Structure formats: C-alpha cells, structure tokens
Amino acid sequence: MDNVELVRVLGVMHFSILVASSLVPFQLDWKKELAGLPKLHYQMYLIYGGYVVLNIVAFGVLSVGFASEIAAQTPFTRAFCGYIAVFWGIRLGLQAVMDAKPYLKRWWLRVGYHLLTLLFTLLTIGYGYLACF
C-alpha cells in the first residue's frame, strides 16, 4: 500500500469511529444520566463533545480529500499527521484507564469497544508513521 492509499484508509477509519460515537449518548443514556448536572455543565459537556466530533470529521475529510498532498509529506503535512497521531495516542491511553465494563453488557458492545481500541491503535501508528518517515 502506498502512502496515498494509507492516508485514504486512515481517513475512512475516522468515519467509522463517528458511527460508533453516535451510539454513545443512547447506550450511556445521557439524557437521564446528565440530567442532574447544572445547565452550564451540561452545555459544556455537549460543546466539548461537539469539538471532538468536529476534529474527527476534519481529520477524515482532510485525509480523504487531500490524501495526495498529505502523502507528499511536506513539513506542514508531517506536523498535521503528528498532531493526529498525538490526538489518537492520547485517546488510546485514555482507553486503558476508562472504566467502560459496566456499560459493555451486550456482546456487540464488547466487540465494538475492542474494535475502537484497534482503530485508535491503527490511527496512532499510521499517522505517526506518516509524520516520521
């Protein structure tokens, strides 16, 4: 696989994460669980989540739409790939300390959780490779 194809595949992975992310508010019953928060805290929670989603959308759109430019590995695109690698590396690290077990009651939720961990790993490695080599 050449670097252009790698960037496109990595870009598409972002969209699969968004599909999984869209299920989180329902699986964790945010409407009920967050209802006790003060209004400002609730709004901030949603805003922070929105910023994360917008970053993931941007990573996917830019990677798919500008794969050739990113694969050219200019100093800017290496920095961009390094940022994405750090973003996903932090998320991968958080995966190890978050206590999701009480919410993984169905087999497909457990499989999905492990698939997300795999995606976070592949994105960290893939963009890290593009940033360094």
Image (cartoon, rainbow, N blue to C red):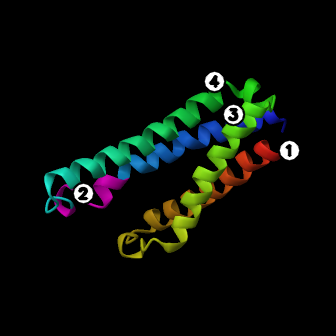
Occupied quadrant, residue 84: top right
Residue at 71% x, 28% y is 67
Mark 4 lies on residue: 65
Label 1 sits on residue: 133
Q: Which of label 4 and label 1 is nearer to you?
A: 1
At mark 1, the secondary structure is loop
Tag nearer the camera, 1 or 2: 1
10 relative position to 38: left or right: right
Can see residue 22? Answer: yes
Q: Earlier in the sequence, mark 3 or mark 2?
A: 3
Instruction: Report if residue 22 lies within the magenta region.
Output: no
Q: Amino acid at mark 1?
A: Phe
Q: Nearer the viewer, residue 105 or 64?
A: 64
Q: Position of residue 38 (x, y in %)?
A: 14, 57
User: Are circles 4 and 3 on residues that touch, CB within 8 Å?
Assistant: no
The part of the chain drawn in magenta is 24-33
* Residue that mark 2 sits on: 30
Mark 4 or 3 closer to N-term? 3
Query: Is 92 left, or right, of 20 in this rendering?
Result: right
Q: Gap in Å between the C-alphas at discs 1 and 2?
A: 42 Å
- Quadrant of the drawing holding the C terminus: top right
Name the image quarter holding the N terminus: top right
Disc 2 element: helix
* Residue hosting label 3: 8
- Camera-side residue of 7 and 94: 94
Crowding at mark 2 (Cα within 10 Å: few <14, some 14-19, many 20+) = few
- The amino acid type, in three-letter code, at marker 3 is Arg
User: Do callouts 3 and 2 mark residues in contact (Cβ within 8 Å)?
Assistant: no
Spot occupied by residue 32 in the image (x, y as percentages of width and height)? 17, 60
Residue type highlighted by circle 2: Trp
Q: Nearer the viewer, mark 3 or mark 1?
A: 1
Between discs 1 and 2, the one toward the N terminus: 2
